[in-house]
Amino acid sequence: MRYVHTNIIAKDAERLIDFYKEVFHCQSIGEKRDLRGEWLDKLTGLSNAHLVGEHLCLPGYGKDHPTLEIFSYDEMEAGAGTQINRCGLAHLAFEVEDVEATLEKVLAKGGGMVGELVHASYEDGRKAVFVYATDCEGNILELQSWA
């Protein structure tokens, strides 16, 4: 058994794919999707389902890697909004060298902030920098750096 991928349904798959490639250096693995057909309708429970998107290799992984799968459907339901404490998937976390510099990239590519950037010290002597941010479609990200 192994973990395979995390899927994000995007309002604009191309824009969101570009965001993750530019900010987090996710790499294309050549698995673009343009899917439709009876099998997809049965799988999704939707009529005439059509989705497009791409699988991206997450940073820090080699050949056997989980992917970030970003798709858009022709017809989509509106989301429930961005709240760090809502039930369900809360955030995607990325360990980065410099939280502040990565946050600047996030903001420059249309992302936002959820809370404040914080410095934390742990009882075992480790120190970390954290911030919750959003990608360009409002999905919550955690940026973290450990010392």
Image (cartoon, rainbow, N blue to C red):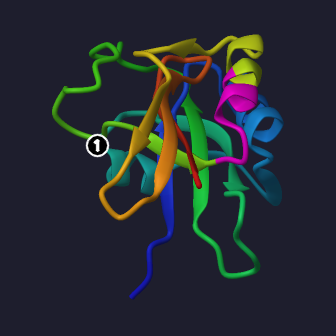
- Residue 48 relative to residue 64: left or right: left
Q: Residue at x 71, y 53 (%)?
A: 56
Q: Is residue 141 above or below residue 103?
A: below
Q: Main secondary structure of the magenta part?
A: helix
Q: Position of residue 113 (x, y in %)?
A: 51, 14
Q: Position of residue 28 (x, y in %)?
A: 82, 54
Q: Position of residue 76 (x, y in %)?
A: 43, 20
Q: Is residue 70 above or below residue 109?
A: below
Q: Residue at x 57, y 30 (%)?
A: 72
- Quadrant for the N terminus in the image: bottom left
- Quadrant for the C terminus in the image: bottom right
State the residue in front, 85 or 35. Answer: 85
* Mark 1 residue crowding within 10 angstroms, few (<14) / some (14–19) / many (20+): few
Q: Quadrant of residue 20?
A: top right
Magenta extent:
96-103
- Residue 36 relative to residue 19: left or right: left
Residue 14 visible in image: no
Callout count: 1
Element type where label 1 sits in the image: loop
The residue that label 1 is drawn on is: 45
State the residue in front, 24 or 77. Answer: 24
Q: Is residue 144 above or below residue 82?
A: below
State the residue in front, 81 or 32. Answer: 81
Q: Quadrant of residue 67?
A: bottom right
Q: Position of residue 111 (x, y in %)?
A: 62, 15
- Residue 3 relative to residue 34: left or right: left
Residue flagged by tag 1: what amino acid is it?
Answer: Gly
State the residue in front, 45 or 61. Answer: 61
Whether residue 101 appears in magenta in the rendering, the answer is: yes
Q: Residue at x 44, y 82 (%)?
A: 2
